[in-house]
Amino acid sequence: MSDITKRALEASLKKMLLKKPVTKITISDITEDCGVNRATFYYHFKDIYDLIEWSCEEDSRIAANGNTTYDTWEQGFLNIFQAVEENKPFILNVYHHVSQEQIIQYLYRVVYQLIINVVEECAQGMSVREEDKKFIADFYKYAFVGMMLDWIRQNMKPSPEKMIFKLSNLIEGDIIRMLEKCQIDKPYNNINK
């Protein structure tokens, strides 16, 4: 029942975001549209921004749909790009009227989780330090989020499929190569130079 109420509140917010910026929407607007009282809203969320964050995380989780392996990460990212595109009015409104730093931090969390799963899978059987795996995941996290933010700024052009195709070609095999270079039993080349 709790998720049904949360989804109903989310649907009301998204409907309102088609008409006005998030800064002009009140909790009373959402609860009235949704047919619940303010106490119900506050039972689930502390404020509108908490609802927005939950909505983004839920949409991303559903979009990734378990595609967090080396063989499926492209589909996971494609699904995330497509979910963002399908929610374009919502995403653009949030992007332009909510703290961009909050959006960036949210994207970092979502992307990092997908990437670290791929890195961990690729590192199986290798002796790679946790800090090196984290470094590789962070590198890709910053690259992917940067690309997604530019894509959002460009009004979500080109298509998600074209974005994933470019990203896939750019990094094909690179995660494994980076992990191989980071293995503990391999000396760092030119470390003291």
Image: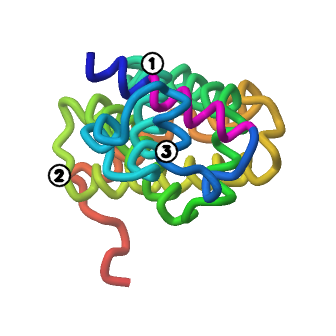
Figure check: 28 above or below 192: above
Q: In this view of the protein, which residue sits in the foreground, 130 or 162?
A: 162
Q: Earlier in the sequence, mark 3 or mark 2?
A: 3
Horizontal side of 138 relative to 146 (left or right) equals: left
Distance CA(mark 1)–CA(mark 3): 45 Å
Under mark 1, the amino acid is: Asp
Point out the stretch of residues depicted in magenta.
8-18
- What residue does disc 3 label? 28
Name which residue lies at 35% across and 51% down: 181
Query: Can residue 180 be seen by looking at this rendering?
Result: yes
Q: Residue 185 bears which disc, if any?
A: 2
Q: Earlier in the sequence, mark 1 or mark 3?
A: 3
Residue 59 belongs to the span the image colors magenta: no
Asked if residue 177 can be seen in this view, the reply is no
Disc on res. 134: none
Q: Which residue is mark 1?
A: 71
- Label 3's element? helix
Q: Position of residue 45 (x, y in %)?
A: 32, 44
Q: Is residue 140 above or below residue 135?
A: above
**Which quarter of the image is occupied by the C terminus?**
bottom left
Q: CA distance from mark 3 to mark 2?
A: 61 Å
**Labels 1 and 2: the sequence-earlier one:** 1
Q: Residue at x 75, y 40 (%)?
A: 19
Residue 15 located within the stretch drawn in magenta: yes
Disc 1 versus disc 2: nearer the observer = 1
Tell us which disc is closer to us: 1 or 3: 3
